[in-house]
Structures are given as C-alpha cells and as structure tokens.
Image (tube, rainbow, N blue to C red):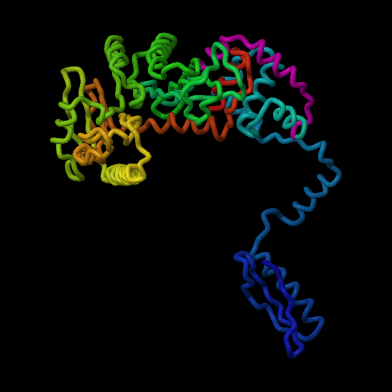
Amino acid sequence: MFIRKRKNPSGSISIQIIDKSKGKYKVVETIACVKDKKELEFYLAKAESRLKQLNPNLFDAVEFNEKKHRFIGIKNKEISVVGPDIIFGYIMEYIGCDKVLKKLKEKELFKQLVLSRIIDPGSKLNLIDYLYIYKHQNLDKNEIYRFLDTLSLNLKDKIEQCIFEYTSMVTGGIRVSFYDVTTLYFEASSEDDLRKVGFSKDGKFTKPQIILGLLTSLEGYPLGFEIHEGNCYEGKTFIPMLEKFQKKFNIEKPIVVADSGLLSKANILELEKLNYRYILGARIKSSSSEIKNKIVSLNLNDEKNIETIYFSKNQKMIVSYSQQRAKKDRYTRTKNYEKLKIKIKSGNLTKAHLNNKGYNKYLVLSDSQTTISIDEDKYNYDSSFDGLKGFVANDFSLNPTQIIEHYTNLWHIERAFRISKTDLKIRPIYHRLEQSVRMFLNFVDF
C-alpha cells in the first residue's frame, strides 16, 4: 500500500491510501480533500500514520535503519552462505554420519560432497565452483578424486550402520522392508566388468549401466543398497541382499515386500527355505488356467472387492478389485485393440508378430495360414480381469487389508529412486573405476 495525491478538476487534492497487491489500484481509504498547502502537509502526515496502522513494518524504523547502516560497508566477497551448513549439517550430525571419518579435513570434504548434492546437484567441478562462489574456498579437482580413491570400502558399512541405528530409533524397529531395483547409465562407449549394456529402465539401451538394488523400511528410510552388473537379472539380486542385511544387523527377519518383477518360483522357494515372510505382487494373467478360472469365478465388484485364494497351508493370494483400476485397464485394452485392427487393415502385420509380447497375444493366424486376425474370445476373456490386482503372501498373521496396505507402501522406494534421479541428479555417471562408483553412490543424501 502507498499514499497517493490526486489532483481533482476543481483544483483540490485528494489524499488517498491505495492498495495494488492484486494488480489493480484500489482506494482503501480517502484521508482528506484539501486546497491549502498547510492542510496538505498536515493530512499527508496523518496519512503516513494511518498507513503504518494498515500496513505495519516488519521491523521498527529506527531499529531497521541501525541494522541497515551496519551492512553498508560490506562487500560481496565478505558474504558467505551458511544456511545449508547449519540445517543439513545438523541433520548429518543428528543421524551420526559426521562420525564415519576421523580426520577433520576428510570430514569437511565429505560433508561438502553430501551437501552440494542436495543444494546444487552436479559434477565435482560444480562443487568446486559452488565452494568458490558461496564459501570462498579454493579446492582442486584432483583433491576430490584422490579423496574418493582413498576412501575405504567399509565406509559404506559405516554409513549403513548409522542409518540403521537412526531408523531403528525413530521407527521402533525394522518390521517390514521393501526392495526394488533400478538402472543407472554411464556416459561411456565401452563396457567393463561392472558396467554392462542391459535392459535399461531409463531407455538408454546402448549405454553401459549398473543395476542398483535398494532396501528401505516401511516408512521409506533407506537401509542398504548394492550394485550389480548392468546385464544381471534383477531377480538374482533379491535374496543375497536380504541375507546380507539380516545377518549384518542381527535382527529378526522382516516381512519382505517386492513387486511382481521379482516374483519367480525360484525366489519364492528360496524365501520359504530361508523362513522369510513375504508379500509379492502377483501376475494374475500369467497364472495357470486353474488359478485364473478361480479368480474369474470370484466375481469381484465395488461391494465385494477383496477375496483370498489359498494355494497351500503356507501360501495364499489376495485378489482385490478397484473401479478406478478397471476403468484404466479397459481404456488401455480397448486402445490397443483398435491399434491392432488398424495394423491388420493396413497389412503391416506378419507371422513375426504372432507372439505373446504385449497385445500381440490376441493375434492368430487364419485356418488358411494366409491372414492374421484378432482372437475375439481371448480378448473378451481378458476383460474379466479388468480392475483386478493380486498379492501373494505366506504370512497368515496379516489380514487381506494389511497385506494390501503393506504392498501399496512400495511407493516409498519408488520415491527414493525418483529423488535420486531427479532431485539429486545421480545420472548419468561419469566415474570409471568401480571404487569411485561405489563411493559416489553412498546414499547419505537420502
């Protein structure tokens, strides 16, 4: 708000308090309409007083002016940014990650590597610029690389120990753990023992990559991670990490939650052999005909939306129905059905397309072996599964609702991957040596 003097056609002057906070001039109050110069000064002073009542200053005018004079002679090079160190540095100390290194210089460099990844994610050269501009520190890039090379591999174990102790303290113990994997690609043209070309979740199929397996708590706190060769099958990363984590911290075996990509007969048998309780996403449409028929016969709907199928005394499948999921499934299936019809009409489909990849499973060859058509019975049968989702579990102490709730909390681990890839800009990776890669991926920033 401000004071405006407006001259009227009659020659008088209106003294008004104006508000322009919403982009338009609005008369809040008219103080007076005067012609005399002395009156003008009097009412302007009155308007100033009224303006202070309507729009009080954050600081007292005298106090503000005193503080303002203190900073008049300060130059930019004398100003340092301390906020990130105070806030995020305190968090590091509270968790205990400041104690993983003993030498003061190493502790400070490790801290700056972590904080820069949060505040201004970028390369090591970016860290040098950040320290120079905001903290007036000169650091050589080779000093950073030597530091990474000299860090012992047990640093990861020390950090995981700190994180585990902190997580156990704030959550009351690790009862449920989530596991998932993602891929991280390198800006490199050649492979080595670790960096391999494989199935990329980032769409970088020609770039060498590694597989990152992450274990988190029910609340989303990271517990541990491992890296594997880029062409490794993700299902093989699952059991070894669970065993390593459970033995390392000597805790009761938690309930393991993972998505359907890790669901294989070998994994399930191994989990049961090692006495793990698990909740895994089920691929309903890939189940046997007997199980699929049982699921269809449940006739799930909005009123009856959860049922249980028992495979044995040690295993069961929870099947849930969601109207929102059904709408999405129906839309996707219909959309791809129309695409197949267009392709058939254009004659672009050949025998090579007769496979079970995606919606090609609906394609069949005519009796004359010359034309390709859509198997309408198979397409219509699939509509029976619209809106259905399955969960395989061997923990009979949990009711169906609890099992579904635990599985839906997998979003925590997806969020961890999203934060690392977007907010922390962890990809692409430019490091070449395996030890440097492992040090780079230490998850203090989570």
Identify whether 245 is placed above or below 284: above
Q: Is residue 328 visible?
A: no
The residue closer to the viewer here, 180 or 133, is 180
Tell me the residue at 77%/55% (across/down). 62
Above or below: residue 213 compared with residue 5? above
Residue 135 in magenta stretch: yes
Residue depicted at x 41% and y 24%:
180
Q: Is residue 221 left or right of residue 124?
A: left
Position in image of residue 407 (x %, y %)? 33, 30
Question: What are the residue bounds of the magenta stretch?
Answer: 134-161
- Circle count: 0
Q: In the depicted view, which residue is nearer to us: 126 or 357?
A: 357
> Relative to 360, is 25 on the left or the right?
right
Q: Nearer the viewer, residue 37 or 185?
A: 185
- Magenta segment includes 393: no
Which residue is most to the bottom? 10
The quadrant of the picture occupied by the N terminus is bottom right
Q: Is residue 25 above or below residue 177?
A: below
Majority secondary structure of magenta residues: helix
Estimate the x, y position of residue 319 in percent, counting from the top left.
22, 33
